[in-house]
Amino acid sequence: MSSQKPTSSENIVSQKYDRCLADLLVKAGVGFSAGVVASVILFRRRTWPIALSTGFGIGAAYADCDRSFNPARVPGTRIITQTEESK
């Protein structure tokens, strides 16, 4: 017998938000770092590579978070309803 307590929906949502926030910080940090390196090495210390690559990191984190909260947006995923199962 398993005495495991069911997980509440609030805990599931808060875990997803925590993962999204951690993912945002990591990807924005990596984008910022890559932008600083590119700015110093390639673009004579301009600021636009930093902003662009940080924005790419934030956008990637947003897309991952969107897929986490709405699994129907994952490419190749098909949502099967109960009426389709009975066919």
Image (cartoon, rainbow, N blue to C red):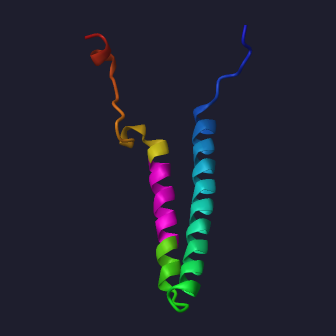
Which residue shows up at 53% across the image and 92% down it? 44
Which residue shows up at 47% across the image and 67% down it? 56
Q: Residue furthest top?
A: 1
Q: Residue furthest left?
A: 87
Above or below, 22 against 57 in this view is above
Which residue shows up at 53% across the image and 79% down it? 50
Q: Residue furthest front?
A: 41
How many marks do you count on the picture? 0
Is 4 positioned to the left or the right of 44 in the image?
A: right
Above or below, 19 against 60 in this view is above
Is 40 positioned to the left or the right of 66 in the image?
A: right
Is 3 positioned to the left or the right of 80 in the image?
A: right
Q: Residues in magenta?
A: 54-66
- Name the foreground residue: 30 vs 5: 30
Q: Position of residue 58 (x, y in %)?
A: 51, 64
Which residue shows up at 47% across the image and 58% down it? 60
Q: Quadrant of the C terminus?
A: top left
Quadrant in which residue 78 is drawn: top left
Q: Is residue 69 magenta?
A: no
Is 44 positioned to the left or the right of 86 in the image?
A: right
Q: Position of residue 54 (x, y in %)?
A: 52, 71
Above or below, 4 against 19 in this view is above
